[in-house]
Every structure is written in structure tokens, then in C-alpha cells.
Image (cartoon, rainbow, N blue to C red):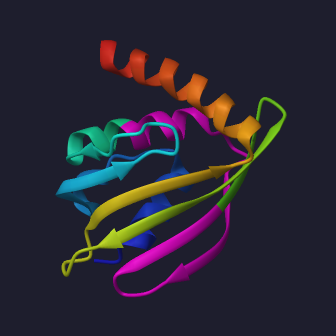
């Protein structure tokens, strides 16, 4: 399984329907704005789905550093006129599934904007 190929395909298509294929059941999501790591595949899926909804067609990966156990993907996008720059840091198990998905974002203005938008999107998704 090539997890990164599947991930890129889902992001390009705007459809995260194959997350169960690439996320380990005990995957941990580490948010740039939530202090506590989010434990488990279902919470990770919720956060990644919300993020894909908040980001838009301007989202793109600019750089990748990949090893067998880790991938660091630098991204850029424009949200409400603010340039968001960050990295997705993935850790893989021996089967190639993601065991940790950590997101780091800059600048502070972008973090504050994403915090508000993610909060609203997570509330909407949780209510659905």
C-alpha cells in the first residue's frame, strides 16, 4: 500500500473516503490549536474531514520529505485572504498505515483563523 499516493489522491479529489484504508485504528491526531492529542481513527477522520472542508482549491503541497517511517509535507493555501503555511507530519506503522498525523501551522494570524473555522466545522460535523 502506498499511503502517500492514496492521501494525495484523496486530497486532490476532495474525498476522504479511503481514510479507513490508510489510518491505523489507534491513530493519533495532533492539532495545531488543540492542546490534547486526539486519540483514535474516528477522531482523526473527523479532524481531517473538517480540515479538508476549511481549506479550499488553493490548498497545495509544495515540499515533501519522506522516509519509510515518516513523511513531512509542507502546504500552502489561502483562506479568507490569509496565506496559511504549514506542515503535515505523518508517522507510519510497518503496514504503511498512519499512526500519527500532526499538523503545524504558521503565521499566528492563520492559526487564529483556522481555530475559529475548524471549531465551527467540527461542531457542524458532530451535529450531523
Rendered position, 88 above or below 44: below
Name the residue at 30% across, 73% down: 92
Residue 106 percent across, percent down from the top left: 70, 50
Horizontally, residue 31 falls left or right of residue 23, namely right
User: Quick one: 103 or 49, which is closer to the camera?
Assistant: 103
Name the residue at 40% across, 17% down: 123
Magenta region, residue range: 47-74
Residue 5 figure quarter: bottom left
Residue 79 figure quarter: top right
Task: Give the total number of marks visible in the rendering.
Answer: 0
Please say whether residue 120 is one of the residues in the magenta stretch.
no
Quadrant showing the C terminus: top left
Q: Residue furthest bottom?
A: 67
Q: Residue furthest top?
A: 127
Name the residue at 51% across, 18% down: 120
Please say whether residue 63 is one of the residues in the magenta stretch.
yes
Q: Residue furthest front?
A: 35
Q: Can you see residue 126?
A: yes
User: Quick one: 106 or 35, which is closer to the camera?
Assistant: 35
Residue 75 figure quarter: bottom right
Q: Can you see residue 128?
A: no
User: Quick one: 7 or 127, which is closer to the camera?
Assistant: 127
Horizontally, residue 114 falls left or right of residue 119, namely right
Residue 109 percent across, percent down from the top left: 75, 36
Quadrant showing the N terminus: bottom left
Horizontally, residue 55 falls left or right of residue 47, namely right
Amino acid at each position: 500500500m502506498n499511503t502517500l499516493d492514496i492521501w494525495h489522491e484523496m486530497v486532490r479529489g476532495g474525498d476522504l473516503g479511503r481514510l479507513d484504508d490508510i489510518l491505523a485504528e489507534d491513530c493519533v491526531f495532533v492539532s495545531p490549536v488543540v492542546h490534547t492529542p486526539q486519540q483514535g481513527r474516528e477522531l482523526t477522520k473527523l479532524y481531517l474531514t473538517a480540515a479538508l472542508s476549511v481549506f479550499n482549491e488553493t490548498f497545495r503541497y509544495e515540499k515533501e520529505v519522506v522516509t519509510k517511517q515518516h513523511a513531512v509535507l509542507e502546504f500552502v493555501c489561502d483562506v479568507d485572504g490569509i496565506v496559511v503555511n504549514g506542515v503535515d507530519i505523518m508517522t507510519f506503522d510497518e503496514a504503511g498505515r498512519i499512526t500519527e498525523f500532526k499538523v503545524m501551522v504558521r503565521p499566528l494570524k492563520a492559526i487564529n483563523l483556522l481555530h475559529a473555522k475548524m471549531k465551527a466545522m467540527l461542531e457542524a460535523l458532530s451535529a450531523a
